[in-house]
Image (spheres, grey):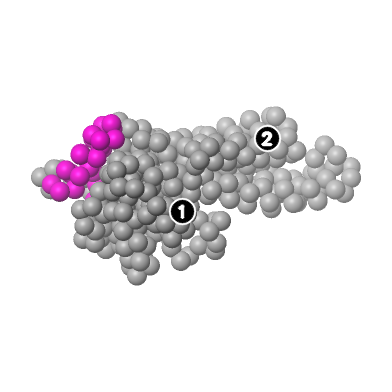
């Protein structure tokens, strides 16, 4: 169901791009905006692991440095049919984890020092399996596609804003409605693109919860982990960059979101309830 939802949302995002592009710049406007958005997001997709790991001062660890963590990751990766990812530890007391890398062969699983101290083995297995599911589902690629389309929409909206400021309307700009339409589009299109992009991110989190439970065989372990992580992330805030919030298993910006519509993660109570409804595998 969430896979279908992702497809529908990506289609809606593409439709929004075509709508605003056709209204303002025609086919040429769409192509130009999409090209620039593609160039900007290509770098973040290709070098995402290096950028994010550097941002959070993560350090790669070997089997001898973190034997228990290494064993968990190796066992679950084999169970998931994935190559062994590189393992990184992020300094800090806030418990959290994320996966990155452009494909399965360049994948990274990163956990904070705080999560290693907080969770028991079953809970940690659930978290690692969740992150491995993100890798298996190519969520980095899907997120980059969504970001590229949303970025193109926002560029076109910006162009519409400046056109309205300087009095340049659309094809029917001889009527006052042309300028008014540009203003409305410049305001609403970026909001709509962002809402759809956030909804895509939430649907991928549900899929990662489900897939992680199947890989680990312990949905209750992941449910317990999410409960602990949610409470701890509020008690020990993380100094996280909002642009990377969608990568973490628990939103590091918890408590700062205006509404769930603008959140990169589903409501925690819903995630936990879904997991508790699943059987042990």
Label 1 residue SS: loop
Identify residue for label 2: 18
Measured in 3D between alpha carbons, the distance from the residue under mark 1 to the one under mark 2, in whole angstroms, is 27 Å
**Label 1 vs 2, first from the N-terminus:** 2
Image depth: mark 1 or mark 2 in front: 1
Q: Residue furthest bottom?
A: 235
Relative vertical location of residue 2 with respect to residue 222 in this rendering, above or below: above
Which quarter of the rendered picture does the C terminus lie within? top left
Q: Which quadrant holds residue 140?
A: top left
Identify residue for label 1: 265
Residue 70: image location, x then y, percent: 18, 44
Q: Residue furthest left?
A: 64
For this view, does 191 lie left or right of residue 198?
Answer: right
Q: Residue at x 53, y 37 (%)?
A: 4
Q: Residue at x 49, y 42 (%)?
A: 2
Q: Residue at x 40, y 36 (%)?
A: 137
Relative vertical location of residue 10 with respect to residue 115 in this rendering, above or below: above
Q: Residue at x 63, y 32 (%)?
A: 32
Q: Residue furthest right?
A: 175
Relative vertical location of residue 19 with respect to residue 259 in this rendering, above or below: above
The span shown in magenta is 67-89
Q: Pick whichever, 212 or 169, lies toward us.
A: 212
Mark 2 crowd level (few <14, some 14–19, many ≥20, 10 Å Cα): some
Residue 211: image location, x then y, percent: 36, 41
Residue 115: image location, x then y, percent: 26, 58
């Amino acid at each position: 169901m969430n896979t279908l939802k992702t497809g529908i949302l990506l289609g809606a995002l593409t439709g929004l791009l075509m709508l605003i592009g056709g209204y303002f710049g025609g086919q040429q406007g769409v192509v130009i905006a999409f090209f620039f958005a593609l160039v900007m997001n290509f770098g973040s997709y290709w070098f995402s692991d290096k950028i994010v790991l550097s941002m959070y001062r993560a350090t790669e660890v070997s089997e001898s440095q973190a034997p228990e963590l290494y064993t968990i990751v190796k066992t679950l990766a084999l169970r998931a049919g994935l190559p062994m990812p590189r393992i990184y530890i992020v300094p800090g007391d806030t418990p959290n984890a994320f996966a990155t890398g452009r494909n399965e062969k360049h994948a990274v699983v990163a956990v904070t020092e705080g999560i290693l101290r907080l969770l028991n083995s079953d809970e940690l297995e659930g978290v690692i399996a969740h992150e491995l599911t993100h890798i298996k589902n190519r969520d980095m690629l899907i997120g980059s596609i969504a970001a590229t389309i949303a970025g193109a929409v926002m560029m076109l909206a910006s162009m519409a804003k400046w056109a309205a400021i300087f009095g340049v309307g659309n094809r029917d700009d001889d009527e006052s409605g042309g300028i008014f339409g540009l203003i409305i589009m410049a305001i609403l299109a970026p909001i709509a693109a962002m809402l759809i992009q956030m909804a895509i991110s939430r649907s991928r989190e549900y899929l990662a919860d489900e897939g992680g439970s199947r890989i680990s065989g312990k949905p209750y372990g992941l449910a317990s982990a999410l409960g602990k992580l949610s409470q701890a992330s509020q008690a020990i805030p993380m100094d996280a960059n909002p642009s990377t919030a969608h990568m973490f298993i628990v939103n590091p910006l918890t408590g700062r979101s205006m509404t769930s519509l603008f959140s990169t993660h589903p409501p925690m109570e819903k995630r936990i309830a879904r997991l508790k409804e699943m059987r042990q595998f």
